[in-house]
Image (cartoon, grey):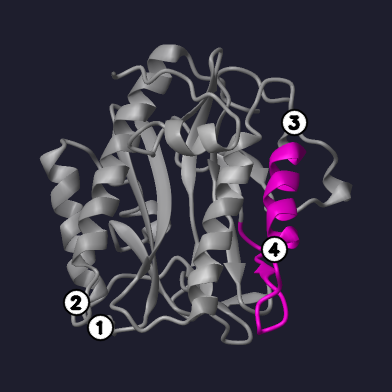
Amino acid sequence: MVEIKTPEQIAKMREAGLVVAAMHDACRAAAVPGATTKDLDEVAAKVLADHGAKPNFLGYGGFPGNICTSVNDIVVHGIPDRETVLKDGDLLSIDAGAIIDGWHGDAAITVFVGEGHSAEQRELSRVTEESMWAGLAAVRKGNRLVDVSRSIEGYIRRQPRPASGSYGIVEDYGGHGIGSQMHMDPHLLNYVDRRRGRGPKLVPGFCLAIEPMVTLGTPKTHVLSDDWTVKTNDGSWSSHWEHSVALTEQGPLVLTAPDGGKAKLAELGITAAPDPLA
């Protein structure tokens, strides 16, 4: 069953979402050559404490970090540690979450560490981020879940192919419902699978975490022996972007974007819902 939120509950999720945005700002600034991924985890923990929020990753299924730090060919669920030292040219995804009064926020960004990145790597991140926004723009009354998947996949497929041959849309992981738990129904594919049908209708109170994961090669992945870290099978680098969004009577509100998604959605012809905390 899909959990439908009240406006008051969405306001609480907006509070959690702004904490996640602050975590990303702080971690992005700290993601410099020579820093360890554990350093970033400690930065995130301080932001959570400063805002009176709880982590939703720490302890989730036994996960040992406040954030996920996934470097280069690690797609998702990288564990922060002292041994992983960031280097110039690394591509790092930071997945972060927070809880305020029992309501969750969840978002991910891709960060360029230092300066040594190819045009292909920069384009990978751009394509992934823009496909996320295409999905967010599809969160409209009357649409169904598959319309979000179609928008994400369609954007990626329309882009010029990279030198590696094609973009891989990771198949084993996707977006999800979010609210009183971090992961809830429905599961959101980043591509269209006709066997799954059209999915539920999007109505006010519907909240989703939209998170495309795209690689410079295969969409196939495997999990390492730590039972968390997900890597590409062919060693190709990946990018991961995510925002949580609520559909309201006035339209979509991007809960984890500082401006609620107003500027970016306007570029796509969509009017963002008013910020309940403004």
**Where the N terminus falls, by quadrant?**
top right
State the image coordinates of residue 146 (x, y, percent, origin top left). Answer: 76, 40
Instruction: Give the magenta-colored segment's residue range.
Output: 146-173
User: In the image, is residue 160 part of the stretch drawn in magenta?
Assistant: yes
Q: Residue 35: which numbered mark, if any?
A: 2
Secondary structure at badge 2 equals loop
Q: Which amino acid does label 3 sit on?
A: Arg
**Where the C terminus falls, by quadrant?**
top left
Check whether the beta carbons of the residues at disc 2 and disc 1 lie within 8 A of each other: yes
**Residue 140: in sight, yes or no?**
yes
User: In the image, is residue 128 part of the stretch drawn in magenta?
Assistant: no
Q: Which residue lies furthest to the right in this view?
A: 195
State the image coordinates of residue 177 (x, y, percent, origin top left). Answer: 56, 37
Q: Residue 144: which numbered mark, if any?
A: 3
N-term-proximal mark, 3 vs 1: 1
- The reply, left or right, for residue 133 in relation to residue 196 is left
**Residues under labels 3 and 4: Cα distance?**
24 Å
Q: Which residue is drawn at 22% across and 71% down?
A: 38
**Residues under labels 4 and 1: Cα distance?**
33 Å
Q: What residue type is labelled 1?
A: Val
Hey, which quadrant is residue 52 in on the image? top left
| Residue ID for mark 4 | 159
Q: In the rendered image of this protein, does residue 243 appear above or below residue 36? A: above
Q: Which amino acid does label 4 sit on?
A: Gln
Secondary structure at badge 1 equals loop
Around disc 3, counting alpha carbons within 10 Å, would you say few (fewer than 14), some (14 to 19), or many (20 or more)? some
N-term-proximal mark, 2 vs 1: 2
State the image coordinates of residue 70 (x, y, percent, origin top left). Answer: 41, 71
N-term-proximal mark, 3 vs 2: 2
| Residue ID for mark 1 | 85
